[in-house]
Amino acid sequence: MLSRRNFLTGSALALVSATAVSGRTAMAAIPEAPTMSSAAMQPPIPPANGQEYQPVVTLNGWTLPWRINGEWKEFHLVAEEVEREIAPGMIAKLWGYNGQAPGPTIEAVEGDKVRIFVTNRLPEHTTVHWHGVLVPNGMDGVGGLTQPHIPVGQTFVYEFQLNRSGTFMYHPHSDEMVQMAMGMMGTFVVHPKDPAFRRVDRDFAFVMSAYRFDPGTSLPQVTEMTDFNIWTFNARVFPGIDALPVRLGDRVRIRIANLTMTNHPIHLHGYHFAVSCTDGGWVPESAQWPETTVDVPVGSIRAVDFTADVPGDWAFHCHKSHHTMNAMGHQVANFIGMRQRDLSVAVNRAAPTAMAMGTDGMADMGMMSMPLPANTLPMMTGTGQFGPIEMGGMFTVVKTRADLASGDYRDPGWYKHPPGSVASVVDATPESAPTAPAMHMRQD
Ligand SMILES: [Cu+2]
């Protein structure tokens, strides 16, 4: 293993620029490459001197620190093998950047000149494409087309000016199928130069990725095209995904990027939102309409803005119901209404721990802690203050509270409902039931 000192020296000597002006930067020292060992949401980084914006918070992620060098903001990405905790109980061996997959969020301001060093510590070549960022052609990161692939062990530098604000991504354009299926991606946020433009009080971001892990394994099946079983927000699944803590009355933005291989209708309870931004820029207000679900196509970003004007624990999830499940077999028959008792007796002779399930639906899966193969997760899980939540995958909660301090992103726990405001059981015996039929009768 190289020490960091050796690594910095070595990569400075081996520096190859993606630009035609390599001589200018070839001798520059490379900034440190910070690394992150935790999959927990890290606090945002305040703006650099003289700049004003609401820093973005990455769900179960972090922001890549930068340094100022003259008129440049300098970043250092390291493409490498990582171990990512998908949720407590499951570790995936992925490829990512600076210790995590997805990589850290790159954050800058419209007008910034950015210099991004990319060191390749993968076993094969790579590149970085800045998805949605308008860059000179030679900075576009398409291996073979706009630059040579970054060989193993080498460092390339990308330099460009950020002329437009918005929400973007980065990912390889080298052996793309494998490298994205292995988790290589990240979010790239460019704040408007005018801090008042579409200003929000809380700004969240994440990228969606999907994997097929055969139970008990830790490497994703990179050739899978359709049958994925782990659907993630920032390579985490419920109940491992951070909540989104929000102060009552806040203007909130959630930036949702999609690098899975299918679309995701992302649904928010409690509020109406509007799509304020895509990876193509800001949507004019005259072109927005109120929504509660936004379909995020593959290779796209939708940022939604809303005012959190009602307190509570509001579900936020993909509306494809199999995307709010964790690892599950997809060849299970529908047993609803079938009598399995005789079958169970026969099966138990051969497999004494086998259990007949599904006769009355699958909710019991949410309550049962059946023995699982190593390194996998229950299909539906998570427990709230009223019992099993019966979710997994792409599900989390917007937690809106009146007593949250601005800038406090700690999980505030479960919502305390005002007395009498929770749906509850009533006496439904025929004598006490309200007489409903009247409303269906026509008065001719
Ligand atoms: Cu989905």
Image (tube, rainbow, N blue to C red):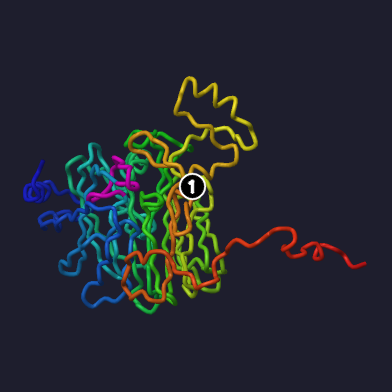
**Quadrant including the N terminus:** top left
Q: Residue at x 13, y 54 (%)?
A: 26
> Between residues 431 and 80, which one lies in front from this camera angle?
431
Q: Residue at x 40, y 34 (%)?
A: 223
Residue 261 in picture, x, y percent from top left: 46, 44
Residue type at tag 1? His
Q: Point out the stretch of residues depicted in magenta.
A: 85-101
Left or right: 9 as drawn, with respect to 382: left
Q: Is 142 above or below relative to 175? A: below
> Between residues 182 and 84, which one lies in front from this camera angle?
84
Left or right: 332 as drawn, with respect to 401: right
> Between residues 428 and 2, which one lies in front from this camera angle?
428
Q: Is 398 above or below relative to 156? A: below
Residue 178 visible? The answer is yes
Kind of element beneath mark 1: helix
Q: Residue at x 14, y 49 (%)?
A: 15
> Between residues 51 and 306, which one lies in front from this camera angle?
306
Q: Which residue is labeled 1 in the image?
A: 323
Residue 354 in picture, x, y percent from top left: 47, 29
Q: Classify residue 341 by image quadrant.
A: top right
Q: Classify residue 194 by image quadrant.
A: bottom left
Mark 1 nearby-residue class (10 Å; few <14, some 14–19, many ≥20): many
Indicate yes or no whether the magenta region holds residue 99.
Answer: yes
Left or right: 388 as drawn, with respect to 170: right
Residue 282 in picture, x, y percent from top left: 45, 68
